[in-house]
Amino acid sequence: MMNELSLDKKLIVFLLKILHTSVLIFTLTGWLLPNKLLLIYLVWIPLMVIQWQLNQETCILTNQENYLLGETNKQKSEQQGQFVKSLFLNLCGFVPADNFLKYLIYFTIFSCWSIGGYKFYLYYYGY
């Protein structure tokens, strides 16, 4: 399907994948930001999760990639976690079950966000 796309669409899909990867890296490592910038991270994570909830647990970047690839008629279950599934497949050679993946994603995000919140609390309240 990708070889049928125009060069412009291929470039946009490539840039979306870079953006998506950057968002993932920020989500996992944002708690490492300097203390004065932690508020950005602490606001970002809930907004990202709310966006997922409002978009049937699918990232808007995944929606854009699917649209550009002409894959807009995929079933909801196939779209959920599509980006993370592709990472698992490329890095580990397998894709975990949807339910496991969902809980793993939320647990990891909540853990990273909690570390950031604790770091923010310690910095601003001096403990």
Image (cartoon, rainbow, N blue to C red):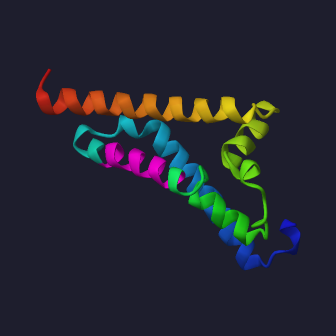
Q: Quadrant of the N terminus?
A: bottom right
Question: If the image is split into quadrants, where does the C terminus sit?
Answer: top left
Q: In the rendered view, does 80 fall on the left or right side of 108?
A: right
- Which of the pair 118/52 is nearer the observer? 52
Residue 24: horizontal and vertical position, in percent?
54, 45
Front residue (pair 49, 28)? 49
Q: Is residue 49 magenta?
A: yes
The residue sitting at 57% across, 35% down in the picture is 105
Majority secondary structure of magenta residues: helix
Residue 126 position in % (x across, y down): 12, 25
Return the x and y of residue 2 as percentages of the image width and height.
Answer: 84, 66
Residue 17 appears in which quarter of the rendering? bottom right
Note whether 17 is above or below 81 in the view shown: below
Image point (67%, 42%), residue name: 84
> In the rendered structure, does residue 120 fall within the stretch colored magenta?
no
x, y percent for residue 8:
71, 78
Q: Where are the magenta residues, as a range? A: 40-52
Q: Quadrant of residue 103?
A: top right
Residue extending farthest to the top is: 127
In the depicted structure, whether residue 93 falls above or below residue 86: above
Which residue sits furthest left?
Answer: 126
Q: How many marks?
A: 0
Q: Please give left or right for residue 111 compared with residue 52 in the image.
A: left
Horizontally, is 12 left or right of 37 in the view?
A: right
The residue sitting at 60% across, 30% down in the picture is: 104
Give the left or right position of residue 113, taking residue 122 as reference. right
Seen in the picture, residue 113 relative to 13 is either above or below; the reply is above
- Quadrant in which residue 67 is drawn: bottom right
Q: Is residue 10 above or below residue 83?
A: below
Determine the residue positioned at 36% across, 28% down.
115
